[in-house]
Image (spheres, rainbow, N blue to C red):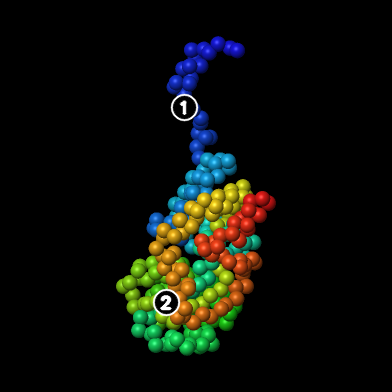
Amino acid sequence: MKPFSFLSLLLLLFCPVGSANDAPEKVIFTRAFADEAYGYYHAQILQRILELTPEFGAAVAEPHPQPMPQARQIIKLLTGEAQVMWSATSAEREKQLLTVRFPLLQGLAGYRVLVIHKFKQGNYPPDMTEQTLQSYLGVQGADWPDLTVLKHNGYKVEGLPWSLWFANMFISVEKGLVDYFPRNVIEVSNDLERHADKLVKLEDNLLLRYPSYEYFFVSPKHPELLRRLYTGLLRMLDNGELKSYFDKHYNHRLALDLATQDTRTIFELENPGISETFKNPLWSVSPAAMREFLQARVAE
């Protein structure tokens, strides 16, 4: 064995251990808004997944510096400028991007209540028929998969371009340019708080329901992330962290209450853009089925 030289000792004392190459990889995710509250749950989950999967390499989740609508988010992933986004799934989206088929919001994105004009509740009686609602004019984001769902089911609905906190949609309802704006039960409470200055309200009697799952999507240029995300989700489900992260968000608890209200008339819709449905996506209530699903994905 060579003697330990003085030069070797100096190198140990004064040269940093590791190099720039040892810095954690940045996993860039896209987002619709710069506000930290938007997507906070999803960003937390993504970061925790990276922490729980060190065997794939050190990594940290970082937001893309520029907020953007979903259509541009997809472009960023296709070019490899960003690695991860989250959104409601569709057949077209799953063709474009690598899909992590796990319902982050437990399928609650497909439970839609209506935002209507504050003084027009009388147009939505408890015994309202679906045919009558279909004759009203609704609005959705122009690049949202939900626009296709509603049109497929015979609803009269138009798409509006992206705007800050969906102001276009709420203004259209307030001014009577459209009759209603379907919002998923998770986001509607925060939305109404943000737009409390407008003459809009949550409709009291109706709920639209269709299969809709919000997934992580991965850039095709970063396929190594796919298995890592599945692995991390499985570990979070098993150790209880996933349920803990979901439950600590007040709007998630409100969403479950809205989704299970027995006073609302439910109109069941088909979703032609869903390639795979789950019998019971409520993994916080019954995790066994989703655990089995994740285990199969990790083993692939």
| Residue 108 position within the rendered picture, expressed as x and y whole percent measured from the top left | 51, 68
Is residue 16 depicted above or below 172 in this figure? above
Q: Which mark is residue 16?
A: 1
Is residue 59 depicted above or below 230 in this figure? above
Quarter of the view holding residue 190:
bottom left
In the drawing, does residue 52 fall left or right of residue 196? right
* Secondary structure of the residue carrying numbered label 1: loop
How far is disc 1 from disc 2 in space, using C-alphas?
A: 58 Å
- Residue farthest toward the right in the current orientation of the protein: 300
Q: Quadrant of the N terminus?
A: top right
Residue type highlighted by circle 2? Val
Q: Nearer the viewer, residue 75 or 210?
A: 210
Residue type highlighted by circle 1? Pro
Residue for badge 2: 115
| Residue 46 position within the rendered picture, expressed as x and y whole percent measured from the top left | 50, 52
Q: Is residue 75 visible?
A: no
| Residue 218 position within the rendered picture, expressed as x and y whole percent measured from the top left | 58, 54
Is residue 239 depicted above or below 127 in this figure? above
Q: Residue at x 51, y 31 (%)?
A: 19
Q: Residue at x 40, y 82 (%)?
A: 176
